């Protein structure tokens, strides 16, 4: 593979200093959240206890990620003087199929993880939640919120950061570089609710493979739309289909299919513990397999 992730990124533009790329990513994410959360905190609308509960979490997800997306778009357009197509936000005849296919694949892979844990005895239906009325409005709103959140992360990490590193050091450096920072910014040890070294390693490895797989998907499609859809579906399915946490966030909504809970004797490495299915060894297996298949597909395409 060459150094160009997106064809449009080969056009003339003002370059961001390569050493500044990770600092800019980290800084804009922090700035975007502060712009949105500080006024709400000052007015008492958001507290540490309610920020990850429904519906307050929507303010965090929609408001802060929309601000991050806006700040990055301004940097790309005003400082670098390039189009959004240069970071993979491409709309063409394949856009609809890429997005729909990515979303369907995300749902299937998420369901495969949950079914794997369920069949292994790690999950069982929660009898205390049987017969709960389902409110479809929060489920639909969460779907749209996760599309915005995931699309922003794909724009920043797989669209902007990966292409910038790749242009200087090659595509594989871009894949590894964006995946390392993505992992660093997503693994909150305290939020996992465990001191187990095995669980910490499992979740860290999962997060890294998560980013590698999405990077390979973006490289193949020359667009971030499929990866954005996959990411959104993955985040959405655990909470809204099975009532399980996503990255440690549990909103307590009545799910579409069945409300699952870890069984008493199941080990954390199987259920994922407080992190939910993403902390399970089943997720590691599914993502490792997906990375291998995506890598083989890319190597076949690159052969003369």
Image: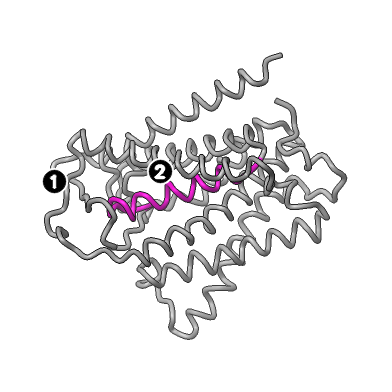
Q: Is residue 235 magenta?
A: yes
Instruction: Please provide percent x and percent y for residue 170.
Output: 72, 31
**Left or right: 303 in relation to 102:** right
Bounds of the magenta segment: 223-247
Work out whether residue 257 or residue 9 is closer to the camera in this orientation and state it: 257
- Establish if 78 lies above or below 87: below
How far apart are the two marked residues, 1 and 2, measured between alpha carbons?
27 Å
Query: What secondary structure is marked by label 2?
Result: helix
> Which residue is disc 2 drawn over?
107
The residue lying at 43 percent from left, 41 percent from top is: 204
Q: Are marks 1 and 2 in contact (CB under 8 Å)?
A: no
Looking at the picture, does residue 280 appear above or below residue 258?
above
User: Toward which corner of the image does residue 97 lie, by quadrant?
Assistant: top right
Q: Seen from this angle, which residue lies furthest front?
A: 93
Any mark on residue 109, and which?
none
Q: Main secondary structure of the magenta part?
A: helix
Q: Nearer the viewer, mark 1 or mark 2?
A: 2
- Can residue 150 be seen in this snapshot? yes
Which residue does the numbered mark 1 point to in the structure image? 264
Q: Residue at (37%, 66%) from the top-left corner?
A: 138
**Quadrant position of residue 81:** bottom right
């Amino acid at each position: 593979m060459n150094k160009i992730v997106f064809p449009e990124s080969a056009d003339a533009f003002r370059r961001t200093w390569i050493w500044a790329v990770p600092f800019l990513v980290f800084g804009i994410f922090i700035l975007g959240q502060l712009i949105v959360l500080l006024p709400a905190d000052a007015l008492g609308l958001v507290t540490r206890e309610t920020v990850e509960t429904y519906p307050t979490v929507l303010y965090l997800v929609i408001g802060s990620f929309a601000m991050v997306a806006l700040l990055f778009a301004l940097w790309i357009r005003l400082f670098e003087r390039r189009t959004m197509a240069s970071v993979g936000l491409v709309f063409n005849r394949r856009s609809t199929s890429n997005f729909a296919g990515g979303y369907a694949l995300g749902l299937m892979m998420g369901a495969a993880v949950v079914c794997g844990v369920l069949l292994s005895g790690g999950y069982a239906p929660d009898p205390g939640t049987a017969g709960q009325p389902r409110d479809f409005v929060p489920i639909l709103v969460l779907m749209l919120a996760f599309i915005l959140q995931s699309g922003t992360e794909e724009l920043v990490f797989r669209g902007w950061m990966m292409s910038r590193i790749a242009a200087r050091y090659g595509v594989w450096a871009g894949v590894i570089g964006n995946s390392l920072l993505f992992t660093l910014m997503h693994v909150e040890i305290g939020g996992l609710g465990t001191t187990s070294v095995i669980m910490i390693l499992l979740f860290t490895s999962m997060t890294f493979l998560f980013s590698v797989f999405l990077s390979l998907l973006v490289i193949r499609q020359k667009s971030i739309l499929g990866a954005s859809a996959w990411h959104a579906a993955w985040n959405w399915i655990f909470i809204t289909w099975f009532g399980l946490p996503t990255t440690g966030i549990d909103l307590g909504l009545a799910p579409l299919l069945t409300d699952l809970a870890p069984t008493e004797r199941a080990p954390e490495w199987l259920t994922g513990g407080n992190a939910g299915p993403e902390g399970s060894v089943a997720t590691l297996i599914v993502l490792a397999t997906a990375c291998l298949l995506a890598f083989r597909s890319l190597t076949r395409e690159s052969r003369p």
